[in-house]
Structure formats: C-alpha cells, structure tokens
Image (cartoon, rainbow, N blue to C red):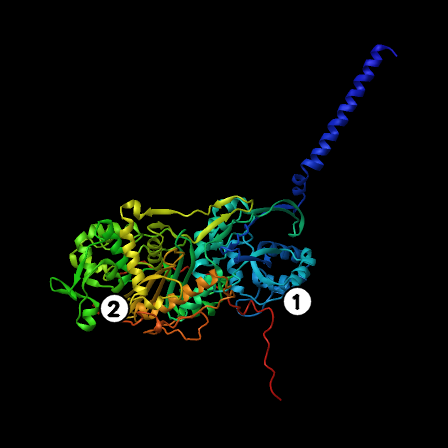
Amino acid sequence: MEPRYRLRLYLLTALVLTGFGVLLNRLHDFQIDRRDEFLQMVPGNSTVTVREPGIRGEITDRNGILLARNLRNYEIAFNLEEVYRAYHSQDAEDPSLKHLTRKDGPGRADEENDIVNIVNHWTIKRFDKLGLTKNYNAGALRTHYLTHRGLVPFSYRTDLTYDEFARCAEHNLVLPGVNLSTRPLRLYPYGALASHVLGYIKPWEPADIPESAKRKFNHYIGDAKGIAGIEQSMDAVLRGQEGQKKLLKDEKGHIIRMIDYTKPGVGAKLTLAIDARAQLHVENVIRRAGRAAAVVMDVNTGEVIAMASIPDYNPNDFIPSISEARWNAYLDNQKMDPFSNRTIRPFTPGSTFKPPTAIAGALEGMANRNFSCDGFILFGKIRIGCWIWNLHKGSHGTLTLPKAIQQSCNPYFMKLANTIGWKAMVTGFQMVGFGKPTGIELPDESAGILPGSGSWRAANPAASMTPAITAMLAIGQADAMATPLQLCAMAACLANGGKYYMPRIVKSATAADGRRVIEDKPKLVVNLIEAGIKPPDLELIRRGMWQAVNKPGGTAARVKIPNIEVAGKTGTAQTIDTGKKSNNSWVICFGPFDQPKYAVCVLVQNGGSGGKVCGPLAHLILRGLFAQDEGLKLPLKAQTAVLGNTARIEEIVIPKDDPLVTLNPDEAEGSGETGEEVENLEATPAPATPEPVIPTPVITPEIDEDGTVIPRAQPVPEP
C-alpha cells in the first residue's frame, strides 16, 4: 500500500478510536457520574434532603451505673405536603376518591382540601388492616400543616412495638408521605433518683428551626434539648452531631433510593461524681422530713457524692411529652416547689455561719482571742440575746473559740465580728465561697446573700454595715443567706485542713472517639493556710466542731457515730414560711475527724432545731456512707417521686430497730439538747432572691373529635 493511503488509513482509524473514546467517556459521564442529575430530570422525580438529630450521650454515676440512656423508639410520621399532593394526584386519576373527604352539613359541603380529612380517610384508614390506627389530636395536625407544610414531619405515633414497626415497614412503599424511623428516646432507669441533678429534656419544637436550615433541608428533625439539671448545663456536650440523608423520590412521594447518608453522631458520655447507691440512701434518709435538702462531698476532691432535694419529680414523665393531667398535678403541688433544687437555693443559715466567722477571725489573727458572754449584746436599743439568755436568762461567761463553737454562743461571735470589722468579715466569707455561686455544673445556682459584699451594697444603696448588721451576719440572721452546697463546701474546706475545692458534679466526659472532653481534675480555689491562717488556729475551729458532737453540752451530739469520730455544727434560723414564723434547721459535719473523707450538710424547712431534726438525719447519712466503705452494698432501685409537705417537725427520733442505727442518739454522751440555736429573735421574711424559671414542657395533645379515627367503645345497655 502506498504511503499516502497508509497515512489516510492511520488517520481514519485514529479518528474512529478517538470518537469511540469520547463516546465512552460521555456515556460514563451520563450514566455514572451524572446519573442522579438526570434522574431528577425525569418528570416528578426529586431529591429530598432530610436532617436527622444527633444521638444524646449517656450519663452514668461515678461507678458506671447508667442514670440516663437511650431506648430505640419506633415512630410513624407524616410528611403532610406529600400526603396532600399524593392524594390529589390519585384524585385526578380516580375522581371517585373525592367522596372520601366530602362531608355534608352547614358550611362543610366540600372539604376535599382539608388535610385532616385527607389524612383520616386516605392515609390513616390504610392502617386499619395493619392494626396501627390510633386516635390523635386533629387540631394539632391541622395547625402543623398550615405552619410547616412538608418541612417538619408530623409525629403520628411514637409508641410502636418492633412488630408493629416491621408490619408497617412492609407496606410503607404504598403509603405516600408516611415516614418510618427509629429515634433514640431518653430514659431515666431509676425514675426520680437524682432528678434535680439529672434534670430532663424537652423535645425539639418547630420554632427552634434556624432560617439557614430551612434553606438547606427539605425536611427537618431537630434535637431534644436539656431544660433542667445536667441535661441543661451539659447540653452542648451531650448532643451528638446532626445526620443528613438524601433521598430520591418519585412524583407520588415514593422513595426510589437513598442517594447519600451521613449517620448522626453520638454525644459525649458524661460521668458524674455522684454515687447512685449513696444518692438513694441520702434521698431516703431526708424523706423523713417534708421539705429538705442534703449534700455529701468528698472533702479531698470537691466531688459531690450525693445531692438530694425533696420534694422531687420523675423526669420520665416528660419523655417524650407530659400529659396535661400529670403536668397539672405538678402545678397543683407548686407550693411544695418540686422542681426547685434546694441544695443550690438560698436559705437563712443561722448558726452554721459561726464557723466562717471563725475563719474570718483567724485570718485576722484572732483565733486565740477570748470573749465574754453576758447573755446578750445591746446595739443601741436593739438587744440580741444568746440562746442561754433567751431560755434561762443565763450566760456563758468567758469563752475560747472552740468552746464558743461547741456551745454556739451568740455574743462571742458577734463581738468577734465587730472586732475585726465588716470588711474583714466579707473577705473571709468570700474566701470560702459565700456571696457568689460555687461554680458547680448545674443551672440556676444561687449566689446567696452576703451582707457587705458589692452585690449586697448595689442592691441596698441606702443601707450600711452597722455593728448590728455585722453581728447578725456572724450568727447567720437578717439578710444573710446561703445554699446547702455552699455550707457543705465550707465544711469540706475545714475538714481537709484549709483547701477549698470547687464543688464538682461532673467527674469527666468522653467523646464517642475516646477523646476526653472534660478531664477528671480537682479544682483548688484557695488554700487558707497559704492565705494566712496558721495551722494551729485552723485546728481550733475544727476542734470546736469536734466538741460540738463529742463533748457534754455540745449542740450536735445527735450526729455522733459509734467508733468513728466526727465533727459538726448545728444551726436553727428564724424565718417566715408560708406567712408564719418558722425555722430553717441545719447541720454541717464531716468525718472521720483525723482522716476526713465526707462532708455533709442537711437542711430541713420548718424544723424545730438543727440538733433535734437535722442531727439524726446526718447521723443516718454518715452511718450508711461509712458502712458502704466497710463493704456493705447499699441498695439501688428505681425511686418514686415524693410530694413533700409543710408540716412542722420538732424532732426526728430514729427507731431502735432502724437497720442503720447501732447507737440510740439519746444515749450518746452530751446528747441532752438545750435548744441553743432557737435564738427567739424577731423572725423576718427571707430576702427576695431570683427563683429558677420552670420551662413549660411539651404537653401531650388531647384526642379531639376529628382525630377520633377509632370509634370509642359504646356502653352495652343492660337487658
């Protein structure tokens, strides 16, 4: 073949091969790379982007016991826009369907466009054969459709069993606009246990959808959010990353296939410092009172081992929503304030403010100063008496600091406070956490009220720290207010030799990939020894609290534990409760004395005295904690909510056969009560402090007439 023909043949062959290659590339482009694009160009096909919520992280106690976890929940939801379009598409093909939504009657001649009628007679009716029909609130569905159309699915059923879910899944392709899904449902396995610590969650609401999400997603399912307790304060840590699903659907709303899927992420696992068994023990102990709170802390780390407040509630009542009847029952009990975590709410502290007054005095080098008690002190025309004067017209004479703590002498501490001055008092009190939140990882923690502090002066611009007000601060009366947590943290500081640790309810948090989000580290705030208190002076305060429990005439004798030395201080503060004169009864204590491990604070509202009411409760709490340390396994079971009451409690007597008691308090050395903290001062209402806001929960909609798709049973007439 001639060269010129050979060249032409080569060129022609190359041209054919090139064209064939281009054709193959184009076919790959159309059929593989751009398949989804061209599928969407088929009439009626569309890509739908669905936002899925992240999976909430679990919450455990310090030993790994699950306190909040997720159940697999099976749900039927309606895309109302797809239901509407699919119905009218079928309607166009088969006009006979119109009679399904037609109702006769004044003003209702033709309701074929009413979404409720369409759902009832065209969608839900198909559930009859599957046994999945359930009555619902049609008004809520109608409002949902008018507000959100197809953006937000309408939740029809969230209570499917697995068998029901599987049965529905088999027929889902013939039910346009019906979405089946599995979602995590929050569960608190132990009911009301630690309810004020854990809090609860609230299902997401369509109003929470950000505008940016409306542009990004065709269908949006939001995240539940914590609105109380740890669920609220640690919400950002507990929430998982959102997921995203892309679906290809035909014009009737049937899913052709899934184009892309990003699984929702799992939030961090939260480990709390509390011990679930100790928590149940403490809750059961303080339920012997009507309204009470108790805190137990590890004195060497600041970890909160137990935090109990009664009355309480069951967080499961709010999952996924709460019935109107149940919510009204809680509201009817509002005077008991069941949603208030009393451990971080402020109360008049009474004589439990004498140890921090001693700390302020020790910082000023006054720990070895003696003061005399003549029974009372006059401030102008104001006479503030000691309990021994008010009861017996007596006096204590000259007292050392330990003896003044043991016998809770008012004049001693009032003189000490005015000797060092109100500014030194404020400095000392603030150093051990009063007048400001402790920083614990819980919402709505109160700062309390510290007279003389900057916040107090700002709130009372016309007031000044007179000697009388300074004296009242020293004995925890008038404007002074503190939380049980603040007092427990102060007691823990005295117990461990002067180290004030920030109270911690969160021990650690671990992400799903194993990364530590929150490290398990104690947070030392201040060391009193480094701040200027001499160790022997601090020991005088500790020794006074030991004498209050263990020496004759001590006010905290009923705290005493056999074979284990503990130290304590009682308090009984005059206040007004429900319009009547009342007391806040207190005890703070720690033990073992030589090698302290636990600090405890107990508060009882409307109690007779700290010694007679709170002393026995603290005794039982410590007895159980020490028994567990010695190998006894405290019980653990689901806790029911307690309503509480306002009854006056003059004394708590522990039965001799109580399983936790090995010592009858009345037989303890020095257990004779003298009513020392009942100062007989003029009771005044507690200063106003901000109350925590209780978010309105999601109320389960009641079944209405249009949503009654299963006829209610009619009574059979008697023959």
Q: Residues within 10 Å of mark 1 (few under 14, many from 20)?
A: few
Q: Position of residue 710 (x, y in %)?
A: 60, 70
Q: Nearer the viewer, residue 646 or 474?
A: 474
Please state the horizontal and vertical placement of residue 417, each as a whole percent of the image: 20, 55
Residue sticking out furthest to the top: 3
Relative to 400, residue 23 above or below = above
Counting from the top left corner in percent of width and height, residue 587 is at 33, 64
Viewer-nearest residue: 230 or 108: 230
Q: CA–CA distance between discs 1 and 2?
A: 70 Å
- The residue tagged with tag 1: helix, strand or loop? loop
Quarter of the rendering occupied by the N terminus: top right
SS label for mark 2: loop
- Residue 676 has which mark? 2
| Circle 2 Cα neighbour tier, 10 Å, few/some/many (<14 / 14–19 / ≥20) | many
Residue furthest out toward the left: 380
User: Is residue 489 at least partly visible in the picture?
Assistant: yes
Label at residue 608: none
What residue appears at the point 44 percent right and 54 percent down from the top-left corner? 232
Q: Quadrant of the C terminus?
A: bottom right
Q: Quadrant of residue 19?
A: top right
**In the image, 361: left or right of 589?**
left
Q: Is residue 606 at all visible to an observer of this figure? A: no
Depth check, front residue: 17 or 501:
501
315 or 420, nearer to the observer: 420
Residue 261 shown left or right of residue 697 in the figure = right
Residue at mark 1? 131
Q: Nearer the viewer, mark 1 or mark 2?
A: 2
In the picture shown, does residue 247 fall above or below 408?
above
Amino acid type, label 1: Gly
Residue type for callout 2:
Glu
Image location (x, y in percent) of residue 630: 48, 61
